[in-house]
Image (tube, rainbow, N blue to C red):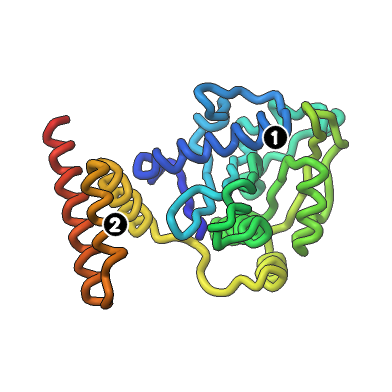
């Protein structure tokens, strides 16, 4: 599922944003060796202070498994203000209907874990579809993506090939960077969906995610003994009625723990 985070709902999903910044640090600094700023294990830059739109891929447990960032080109953005070398002196593309897509990454370690029910490929395609569908619904006609050659090949393999490129490819850290252009059309969305076998709505319900994250936080506030007791009751349930009762007990105890924490605060 894809959660859209923007200036209007950012305060609701600070924990998701924090996890996203940690994922970006692992990918762009540790794995790819890019010259990015990392503090306390989190990668962010000045563009994260400009109210970008984040599209965040979540698994069924609401963990962050992928993300990307979208910025309007009418203001500061990476291609114009950081990757000027790519443009080779060409003028920047600036338009209210042309947006920039950067910081696309997937949590390959989490997705390759034996317990994962999602694959790297399916998550990447769902995130690509989310970018195209969000852009289409927002009236965006074109997206500029600053990517490395490996990501460019992935776009082509997923039937999401760019229709053109700006400037040239430049070296950045251990890898290279280039600017790919994608038109946002119903045809592109259909191609991505058909390639990946995606059906139905891929966007998460904000309230549902917020409630699930609040419930998880509440459970984390429970004492270890109480959590173990609840887990034992759920595991010992022999009927659906007993399981529902055990789950309801855990939810009630978690809420009590959270309420007590709020009172102390």
- In this rendered view, identify the residue nearer to me: 231 or 139: 231
Residue at position x 73%, y 57% in the image = 183
Q: Which mark is residue 3?
A: none
Labels 2 & 1 near each other (Cβ < 8 A): no
Residue 237 appears at what percent x and percent y? 26, 70
* In this rendering, position of residue 16 left or right of residue 69: left
Q: Position of residue 30 (x, y in %)?
A: 66, 30
Q: Residue at x 75, y 60 (%)?
A: 160
> 128 or 113, which is in the foreground?
113
| Residue shown at 80% from the left, 60% from the top | 157
| Dot 2 crowding, Cα within 10 Å, few <14, some 14–19, many 20+ | some
Q: Which residue is mark 1?
A: 31
Q: Identify the residue under disc 2.
A: 231
Would you place residue 92 above or below residue 125 in this image? above
Indicate the quadrant where residue 169 lies: top right
105 on left or right of 90: left
User: Element under label 1?
Assistant: helix
Instruction: Single out the mark in the foreground, 2 or 1.
Output: 2
Q: Secondary structure at mark 2?
A: helix
In the rendered image, residue 120, in percent from the top left (x then y), is placed at: 65, 56
Do we see residue 181 in this rendering? Answer: yes
Which callout, 2 or 1, points at the residue further toward the start of the chain? 1
Query: Badge 1: few (under 14), some or many (20 or more) residues near its Cα, within 10 Å?
Result: few
Q: Does 3 sit left or right of 194 as displayed? A: left
Identify the image quadrant of the C terminus.
top left
- Asked whether the viewer can see residue 139, the reply is no
So how many labels did they put on this image? 2
Question: Height in image: 41 above or below 58?
Answer: above
Q: Tell which of 256 and 106 is nearer to you.
A: 256
């Amino acid at each position: 599922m894809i959660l859209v985070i923007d200036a209007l709902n950012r305060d609701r999903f600070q924990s998701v944003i924090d996890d996203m910044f940690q994922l970006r640090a692992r990918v762009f600094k540790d794995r790819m060796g890019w010259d990015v700023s990392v503090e306390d294990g989190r990668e962010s830059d000045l563009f994260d202070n400009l109210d970008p739109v984040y599209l965040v891929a979540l698994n069924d447990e609401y963990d962050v498994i992928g993300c990307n960032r979208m910025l309007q080109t009418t203001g500061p953005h990476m291609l114009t203000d950081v990757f000027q070398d790519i443009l080779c002196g060409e003028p920047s593309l600036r338009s209210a209907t042309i947006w920039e897509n950067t910081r696309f990454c997937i949590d390959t370690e989490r997705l390759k874990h034996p317990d994962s029910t999602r694959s790297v490929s399916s998550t990447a395609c769902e995130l690509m579809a989310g970018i195209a569908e969000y852009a289409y619904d927002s009236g965006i006609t074109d997206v500029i993506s600053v990517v490395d050659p490996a990501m460019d090949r992935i776009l082509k393999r997923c039937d999401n090939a760019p229709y053109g490129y700006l400037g040239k490819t430049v070296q950045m850290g251990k890898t290279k960077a280039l600017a790919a252009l994608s038109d946002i059309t119903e045809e592109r969305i259909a191609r991505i969906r058909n390639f990946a076998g995606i059906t139905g709505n891929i966007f998460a319900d904000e309230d549902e995610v917020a409630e699930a994250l609040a419930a998880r936080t509440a459970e984390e506030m429970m004492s270890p003994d109480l959590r173990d007791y609840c887990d034992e009751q759920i595991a010992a349930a022999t009927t659906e009625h007993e399981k529902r009762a055990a789950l309801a007990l855990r939810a009630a105890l978690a809420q009590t723990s959270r309420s007590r924490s709020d009172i102390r605060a």
